[in-house]
Amino acid sequence: MNQKNNNLDVEQTVKIISFFIQNLDVEDEIKAFFFDYIQKIEDPEEMQNFFDFLENTYVNQEMVKKEKDYIQKIEEIDSQTIKELNKILK
């Protein structure tokens, strides 16, 4: 983090981290733990490491959601195709 804007960077990082935490698909107790944890972080490097961890977790979660949506769409298309083929074969 940039030293001269360290306080601003930390504030912005905490806001972004809060967004990631709020949008994680985890239990409320885990979210509460993360919120409590970020309030105790004083070292900018530790803050950056935690930010990286949450960012990666959030991105992976979103990718999994997209993959599930994609698989569901494929299954719906396959199901519809099978129904249509069955009609033709009858």
Image: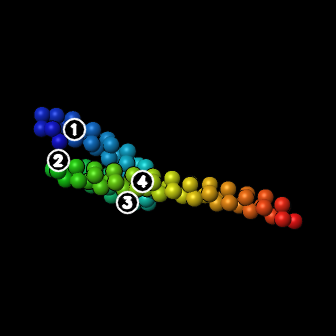
Q: Which mark is residue 24?
A: 4
Quadrant in which residue 88 is drawn: bottom right
What residue is rendered at 12% in x and 34% in y? 4
Q: In 3D space, how far apart are the residues under numbered discs 2 and 3 (Cα atoms)?
A: 22 Å
Looking at the rendered structure, the kind of residue marked 1 is: Asp
Looking at the rendered structure, the kind of residue marked 4 is: Leu
Residue lying at the far left of the rendered structure: 3
Do the CB atoms of the residues marked 1 and 3 lie less than 8 Å apart? no
Looking at the rendered structure, the kind of residue marked 3 is: Ile
Do the CB atoms of the residues marked 1 and 2 lie less than 8 Å apart? yes
Q: Which mark is residue 44?
A: 2
Q: In 3D space, how far apart are the residues under numbered discs 2 and 4 (Cα atoms)?
A: 23 Å
Circle 1 residue: 9
Quadrant in which residue 71 is drawn: bottom right
What residue is rendered at 45% in x and 52% in y? 62
Q: Is residue 9 above or below residue 76?
A: above
Q: Earlier in the sequence, mark 1 or mark 4?
A: 1
Dot 3 falls on a residue whose secondary structure is helix
Dot 1 falls on a residue whose secondary structure is helix
Disc 2 versus disc 3: nearer the observer:
2
Screen quadrant of the C terminus: bottom right
Do the CB atoms of the residues marked 3 and 4 lie less than 8 Å apart? yes
Q: In 3D space, how far apart are the residues under numbered discs 1 and 2 (Cα atoms)?
A: 9 Å
Q: Which mark is residue 30?
A: 3
